[in-house]
Image: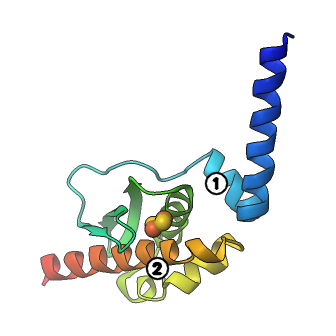
């Protein structure tokens, strides 16, 4: 291995260590493997919200028998917003509308376990977008 490879490997390890400190093991693994990332064509519920930080979160929900069969998030935001969107989508899967209302920013934070204090609003953004996607679904089925 040459010096440049060493440099890159050390740098990557340092970034990983910092991410583990910031997000905990669970959040770190999700950052490395952002499950539920993407878009769903013809969702039953969808919302897009731009937070005060300027980042945009989208949530897509597909229902079957009034329960979320498929969920996805899409964001142009920071690592924390991606982790929060991913866990919000994960929490949504399998739930009916009533149960979905329990997914608050605090619930998302609890699921992750740890997030830097300065990024905790990202969980609020993910939850708010999920609730708006649910609201849009409810309007459609009325
Ligand atoms: Fe605002 Fe991450 S969503 S900084």
- From the viewer's perspective, is the residue at label 2 or at label 1 nearer? 2
Real-space Cα distance between discs 2 and 1? 18 Å
Mark 2 secondary-structure assignment: helix
Determine the residue positioned at 68% across, 61% down. Answer: 27
User: Does residue 89 show up?
Assistant: no
Mark 1 vs ligand 1: CB below 8 Å: no
Q: Is residue 129 rendered to the left or right of residue 5?
A: left
Q: Is residue 16 rendered to the left or right of residue 103?
A: right
Mark 1 secondary-structure assignment: helix
Nearest the viewer among 32 and 43 is: 32
Residue assigned mark 1: 30
Residue 70 x/y as whole percent: 40, 59
Vertical arrangement, residue 76 with respect to residue 11, above or below: below
Vertical arrangement, residue 48 with respect to residue 110, above or below: above
In the figure, residue 12 lies in which quadrant?
A: top right
Residue assigned mark 2: 124
Residue 92 x/y as whole percent: 46, 71
Q: Say whether disc 2 or disc 1 marks the residue closer to the N-terminus.
A: 1
**Quarter of the N terminus within the rendering:** top right
Most extreme residue toward the top, as rendered?
Answer: 2
Determine the residue positioned at 34% across, 80% down. Answer: 131
In the figure, residue 133 lies in which quadrant?
A: bottom left
Residue 86 x/y as whole percent: 51, 60
Residue 57 x/y as whole percent: 36, 63
Determine the residue positioned at 51% across, 75% down. Answer: 123
């Amino acid at each position: 291995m040459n010096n440049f490879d060493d440099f890159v490997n050390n740098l990557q390890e340092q970034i990983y260590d910092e991410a583990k400190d910031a997000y905990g093991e669970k959040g770190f693994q999700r950052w490395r493997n952002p499950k539920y990332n993407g878009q769903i064509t013809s969702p039953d519920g969808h919302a897009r919200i731009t937070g005060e930080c300027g980042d945009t979160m989208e949530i897509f929900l597909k229902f079957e028998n009034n329960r979320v069969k498929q969920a996805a998030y899409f964001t142009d935001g920071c690592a924390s917003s991606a982790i929060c969107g991913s866990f919000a989508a994960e929490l949504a899967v399998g739930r009916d509308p009533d149960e979905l209302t329990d997914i608050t920013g605090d619930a998302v934070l609890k699921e992750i376990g740890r997030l830097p204090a300065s990024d905790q609003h990202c969980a609020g953004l993910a939850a708010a977008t999920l609730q708006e996607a649910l609201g849009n679904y409810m309007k459609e089925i009325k």
